[in-house]
Image (cartoon, grey):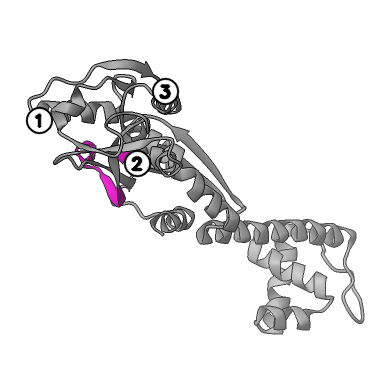
Amino acid sequence: MNLHALRLFYYVAETGSVTKAAARLNISQPAVTSQIKKFEKDLGLPLFNPSGRGISLTSFGTELAKQAGNLFTYEEQMDEFVEDYRQGKKGKLRIAATYLPANFLVPGWAARFKAGHPGIEIEITTMNSQQAFEQLQRHEADVAFYGGGAKEKPEDVEWLELFEDELWFVVAPSHPYADRTVSLPEMMREPFIMREEGSSTRERLVSLCTTYGLKPPEVALQFSGLGEAIRSVIAGYGANFISSLAVHEYVEWKQLSRVHVEGIHLSNHIAVCTRKNESLPAALQQFIDICRQ
């Protein structure tokens, strides 16, 4: 079916006038009349009843105009749908994030984004860095948020560093080292409460000891969750090496105290990662803009 001719017919039927339809479509009246006559011939069915004045549709013409109205209304909806996606008003964001940004950063960014983009669905999955990068590379995630050492940066990923997050040694306020400056060997003689082997911060601590030729500290308590490890240190036992994002409020509230270790200044890199050489959808770019603020 000739959709251009169908559109001409629909506007004639809707306005009840060839003249009005021609003006609305910005084409000449004879062109409208000629194309509709050809359209009738192609269909093999009459669209208009013979009439001395005005427009009178046949029963087929009436029904075809109704069906055409449904089609062109749906076409308008499709145009709006495409434009909403183009402007970042509709769609879905699939976010892969490592533990640190997933727990302490992405929720706040997502809440601010949703306030201005209610039509965007957001799916956030917490995983380790290898899984996050794999999901991004397999197009199973639209963006990955990473918190850790920069050495894990994949070559095929666009890496935008947002900021650096300091790593702190913390103890309970009653600990002898609370708010003091000590040497690294002194600190490593303390029992530590850490997350499981394989956690990035624990690996950074082991790497630090290797760099300075020290034996890694005793891990006296091991937890799979960061919250449990923090609460154990607050309770008064051991030390922890941890992201400042995770504990800065506890330090402010005097539930934990920092230990300053001579010559040691380590940090996590907080980065947003996308696929290289790929243009970003509007919604994702707007989300990243919020993160950069």
Give percent across and percent down for residue 30: 70, 83
Q: Is residue 98 visible?
A: no
Would you name the residue on which mark 2 appears?
Answer: 244
Classify mark 1: helix, strand or loop. Answer: helix
Of pointers 1 and 2, the one earlier in the residue sequence: 1
Position above or below: 50 against 210: below
Of residue 67 and residue 268, the one placed in the foreground of this image is 268
Q: Which mark is residue 211?
A: 1
Other residues around mark 2 within 10 Å, as few (<14) / some (14–19) / many (≥20) = some
Classify mark 2: helix, strand or loop. Answer: helix
Would you name the residue on which mark 3 appears?
Answer: 232
Tell me the amino acid under the disc marked 2: Ser
Classify mark 3: helix, strand or loop. Answer: helix
Q: Nearer the viewer, mark 1 or mark 3?
A: 3
User: Is residue 12 inside the magenta stretch?
Assistant: no
Q: CA distance from mark 1 to mark 3?
A: 28 Å
